[in-house]
Amino acid sequence: MKNVVYLKALDLDKEGKWNEAHSLIQDFPDANAAWIHAYLHRKEGDQWNAEYWYNRADQPVFKGSLEEEWQHIYYTLSDS
């Protein structure tokens, strides 16, 4: 069930609905939600906040493009 929420948040972001994606994912307490949260704050340009959420997700700060990161998260979570 959670994967559906994760993928919905990523889909909302892809549709240009950053605020809706952030609102959907921000209250989930697990590492995968934190990973998406990190990506969203990186996209927003809030690097400090993004790094906080990467740490909470136990994920390295992504060094590639935002599109590459979106795809990486989406396909990782859709396979789990």
Image (spheres, rainbow, N blue to C red):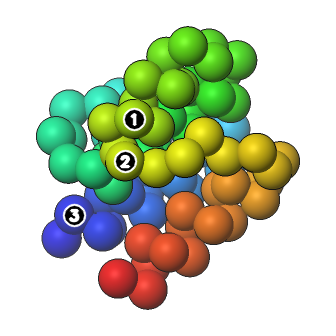
Q: Say which residue appears at 68% left-offset and 55% top-offset.
A: 69
- In the image, which disc is placed on residue 55? 1
Q: Residue furthest right?
A: 65
Circle 2 — which element? loop
Quarter the N terminus occupies: bottom left
How far apart are labels 3 and 1 at the CA level?
20 Å
Point 22% across, 63% down: residue: 2
- Amino acid carrying mark 2 in the image: Asp
- Tell me whether the residue at label 2 lies in contact with that at label 3, contact meaning CB atoms closer than 8 angstroms: no
Task: Indicate the position of residue 63 as horizontal and vertical percent values.
Answer: 76, 45
Q: Quadrant of the C terminus?
A: bottom left
Asked if disc 1 and disc 2 are in contact, CB closer than 8 Å, the reply is yes
Q: Is residue 61 visible?
A: yes
**Which mark lies nearer to you, 2 or 3?**
2
Give the x, y percent position of residue 75: 56, 76
Q: Is residue 7 above or below residue 9?
A: below
Q: Estimate the spatial distance between the alpha carbons at disc 1 and disc 2, rounded to whole Å.
A: 5 Å
Q: Is residue 54 above or below residue 6?
A: above
The amino acid at mark 1 is: Asn
Local SS, label 1: helix
Q: Which mark identifies residue 43?
A: none
List the residue tagged with mark 3.
2
Q: Which residue is mark 2?
A: 58
Q: Is residue 29 left or right of residue 50?
A: left
Q: Secondary structure at mark 3?
A: helix
- Corner quadrant of residue 57: top left
Residue 14 image offset from top left, x and y in percent: 66, 50
Check contact, mark 3 vs mark 1: CB within 8 A. no
Q: Is residue 20 visible?
A: no
Residue 6: quadrant of the picture = bottom left
Up-down relation of residue 62 to residue 11 (above or below): above
